[in-house]
């Protein structure tokens, strides 16, 4: 409990879950996962249900644990600012952008944010809250149509929403190709793709 900053332990150890805050419960979950002496931690949306004022603290704890124990970590989030913050805490790492369970872009996070290639990545960045798009009108991505992406059986998983869709996008799923040493994309708009 000390490693996840839950002290004094005597105050925490005898409490029931409903008596703990969301942040305390999340830190207990982290401590529980560490009790198994893992080599890999999968942190799936670790701060989504945590009060905004406590999110950075949880991220700092995760990064400290990862770095101190030399653990591998898969950090899953849909929140780009959170991903960027964590990315810099853990001294970088590989970033993978996924859509409908498929990798659409991979590389260094800062490079992806500076030069996004896949149309989904571009749309994801455009809808990320920032001072600019809070003040100005927000762009609506695609039509307000619910799409069941689990039913996209052939082609690029983003072909139902992509503004650049081509016939080949509907027929075959593009493979992940290198655009440079640190950046890959799964899109027919970039280079040779089979």
Image (cartoon, rainbow, N blue to C red):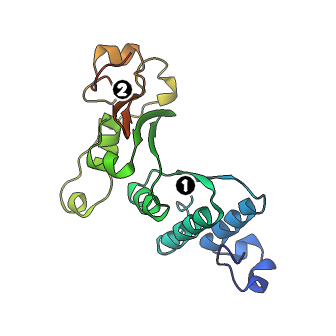
Mark 1–mark 2 CB contact (< 8 Å): no
Rendered view: 66 above or below 164 = below
In the picture, residue 85 is in which quadrant?
Answer: bottom left
Looking at marks 1 and 2 on the same chain, the residue that comes earlier in the sequence is marked by: 1
Residue designated by label 2 = 160
Question: Is residue 116 shown left or right of residue 55?
Answer: left
Q: Is residue 142 above or below residue 71?
A: above
Q: Nearer the viewer, residue 66 or 74?
A: 66
Q: Residue at x 42, y 20 (%)?
A: 173
Quadrant containing the N terminus in the rendered view = bottom right
| Element class at badge 2 | loop
Count residues near mark 1 (Cα–Cα under 10 Å), then give few for <14, some for 14-19, many for 20+: some
Identify residue for label 1: 45
- In the orientation shown, which residue stands out farthest toward the right? 14
- Tag of residue 73: none
Asked where in the image residue 47 lies, by quadrant, the reply is bottom right
User: Could you tell me residue 55's position as x and y percent?
Assistant: 50, 69
Outermost residue, left direction?
Answer: 136
- The residue at the point 20 percent across, 63 percent down is 135
Whether residue 32 is situated above or below residue 137 in the rendered picture: below
- Name the secondary structure under disc 1: loop
Residue located 57% across and 59% down the image = 46
- Residue 157 position (above or below residue 136): above
Q: Residue at x 35, y 19 (%)?
A: 193
In the displayed structure image, the side of residue 149 where residue 11 appears, left or right: right
Task: Tell me if 162 is positioned left or right of 137 in this view.
Answer: right
Locate residue 101, reporting x and y percent. Answer: 52, 34
Callout 2 crowding tier (Cα within 10 Å): few <14, some 14–19, many ≥20: some
Q: Is residue 107 visible?
A: yes
- Distance from Cα at disc 1 to Cα at disc 2: 26 Å
């Amino acid at each position: 409990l000390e490693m996840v900053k839950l002290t004094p332990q005597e105050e925490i150890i005898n409490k029931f879950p409903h008596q703990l805050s969301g942040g305390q419960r999340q830190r207990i979950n982290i401590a529980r996962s560490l009790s198994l002496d893992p080599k890999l931690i999968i942190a799936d949306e670790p701060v989504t249900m945590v009060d905004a004022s406590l999110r950075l603290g949880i991220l700092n704890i995760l990064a400290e644990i990862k770095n101190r124990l030399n653990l591998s970590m898969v950090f899953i989030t849909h929140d780009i600012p959170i991903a960027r913050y964590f990315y810099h805490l853990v001294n970088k790492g590989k970033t993978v952008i996924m859509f409908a369970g498929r990798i659409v872009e991979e590389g260094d996070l800062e490079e992806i944010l500076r030069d996004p290639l896949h149309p989904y990545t571009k749309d994801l960045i455009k809808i990320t809250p920032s001072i600019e798009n809070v003040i100005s009108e927000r762009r609506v991505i695609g039509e307000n149509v619910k799409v069941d992406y689990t039913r996209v059986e052939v082609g690029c998983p983003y072909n139902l929403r992509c503004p650049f869709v081509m016939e080949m996008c509907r027929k075959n799923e593009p493979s992940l190709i290198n655009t440079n040493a640190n950046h890959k994309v799964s899109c027919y708009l970039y280079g040779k793709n089979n």
